[in-house]
Every structure is written in C-alpha cells, then in structure tokens.
Image (spheres, rainbow, N blue to C red):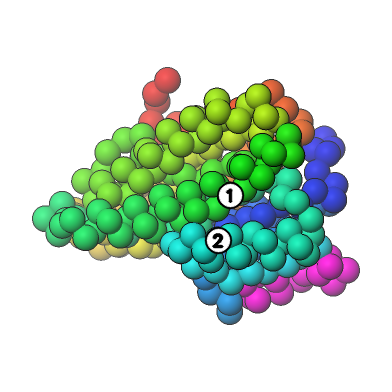
Amino acid sequence: MNLQLDNQHVLITGGSKGIGLACALGFLREGARVSLVSRDGANLEAARQTLTAQMGEDTSARIAVYTADLKLPGDAVEALDAAEVNFGPIDVLVNSAGAAKRTPPEALEPLVWHEAMEAKYFTYIHMIDPVVKRMGARGRGAIVNVIGMGGKVASPIHMPGGAANAALMLVSAGMAAAYAGKGVRVNAVNPGLTLTARLQEGMKADAGMQGIATDEALQRATAKLPLGRIATPEEIANAVVFLASPRASYVTGAILAMDGAVTPMI
C-alpha cells in the first residue's frame, strides 16, 4: 500500500533510538524526509549512520538531526524552527521522547512525581504546543504520540510515569477534537513491552518488587503475553507510520493499544 508520504516532512522527537528510530526508518522507506530531535548529539549521529546504512548513502539528504533538551520549551521551539528552515513546514509530528523512571511506592516523594512529568509529559507538550498551532494555521498536519499502556492500568512501580501517560492520552484526545476543524489529526499509540533499551530498566524495577532476578522477571512477563512474545520497535513504528499517513485520513482522537492483548479492555 502506498501511504502517500513521499517528500513529507516528519519531525520525530526521541528519534535517535528505540521506537523513534524505528519510526524514522519507516518514514524514510515511504519517501519522507525526517528531522530527528534528541538531547544526545552522539546518539543522533549514530542514528544517522544506522539509517543511511540501512537505506543507502543517497538517503542522507533526507535526514537531519537536531540536539535539544525538550524539558525546555525554548529548546523545543529552536529545534522546530531549524527543522522548518531546512525541510519546510512540518507535515507530521511523532513524539517518542522521554521516559519516567520506574520507582517503587516506598521510594516515592514529590520530587519523583515532578521529574516524571518533566521527563514524559512536558517533553511532549513543549513540541506539541508550537507544532499543532502552526499546523492549524496552515490547515493540515498529523500528530502521533507514542505514549504507553502505563497510563491505562496502574502499576505499583510506575505510578508517576503512568500519571504522565494518562495525561498525554487526554491531551491527544482533546487536541484531536480542538483541531479537527483546522485539518489537523492527533492520535496516540500505547505500546506494551517492547524490545528497546528501556525494557531492561523496567524489568530491573519489576524484579526488585518481586525479589527475583531480572532475567526471571522478563521470562514471567513474556509468559503473560497472549501473543507469546515481546513487540519489536518496528511493529510499533508500522502503526505510527500508518496513523500519520493520508491513508488514515478519517482517524483522529484514537488511542491505539499495542500490548498484545495483555489488557483486554474496551
């Protein structure tokens, strides 16, 4: 299926690794130009090399990278401005930056809750806010927020991060309603366990709660998955690329669960 993304400008926050990097590859395969934003310049250069190695050296002209700390609204706007000067207005925004640390209940304190919102919620908001306004003024655009199932089901070791995820789901649905009449679609994807570097951190925290080894925690978690395996970043990216494409032109305000049916809810 041709997703009609050829030459579109896609900005991906958290695009240097994990799901964000997989999304970048997916959009490049569809002919889009991608701007990757991350706070780590070394990771961004490594991502650029990975993408060109997989797509071919001639793809390098369709890849741009920008270093920014998205906890700072000024950094977000600066990266956005630079990206639009380079490749033109943003057609698609994919937010995949930031993650809140897993914290056991007895270690929670107000600062941990604040840090979780800064790490996951505001890193998204600081880019969504200027982008959605510019898209609305132009009368077109699509936003996909990669959030997480932690905002649907409370976990004892992921309450601050889960709260940030739940807030982002509300923002996604609210922005979809607010900007639908202006030609902007906003959707969200909620991955469950996914084979990224962050998986090990979560398993370590879960193992601590259960008093078992990390490998054992991973085995137990995998055994609970109806599909019998953990998702790959590419599988999450496939859904993101479709939702961002004109082929999903009547899909907005959707919150897509991608946890392999672990949470059977309507």
Q: Secondary structure at mark 1?
A: helix
Q: Residue at x 35, y 62 (%)?
A: 201
Instruction: Find out whether residue 104 is within the magenta segment.
Output: no
Q: Residue furthest top?
A: 266
The residue indicated by pointer 2 is 76
Name the amino acid type tagged 2.
Ala
Q: Quadrant of the rendered structure where residue 113 is? A: bottom left
Asked if 103 appears above or below 188 in the picture, the reply is below
The residue indicated by pointer 1 is 130
Total labels: the figure holds 2
Q: Where residue 57 appears, x then y in whole percent?
A: 84, 72
Q: Residue furthest bottom?
A: 42
Q: Quadrant of the rendered structure where residue 47 is? A: bottom right
Q: Residue furthest left?
A: 106
Q: Where residue 242 appears, x then y in whole percent?
A: 69, 37
Q: Where residue 5 appears, x then y in whole percent?
A: 80, 43
Q: Is 67 positioned to the left or the right of 221 in the image?
A: right
Work out whether residue 177 can be spotted.
Answer: yes
Q: Where residue 66 appears, x then y in whole percent?
A: 64, 69
Badge 1: how crowded within 10 Å, few (<14), some, or many (20+)? Answer: some
Q: Residue at x 82, y 35 (%)?
A: 1
Could you tell me how far apart the alpha carbons at marks 2 and 1 are, in whole angstroms?
A: 9 Å
Magenta-drawn segment: 43-61
Question: The C terminus is located in which quarter?
Answer: top left
Name the amino acid type tagged 1.
Pro
Q: Which disc number belongs to residue 43?
A: none
Q: Residue at x 39, y 58 (%)?
A: 119
Along the line of sight, which residue is nearer the eye, 195 or 172?
172
Judged by its main secondary structure, the magenta piece is helix
Along the line of sight, which residue is nearer the eye, 106 or 94?
94
Please report whichever mark, 2 or 1, sits nearer to the chain's N-terminal start.
2
Q: Quadrant of the rendered structure where residue 263 is? A: top left
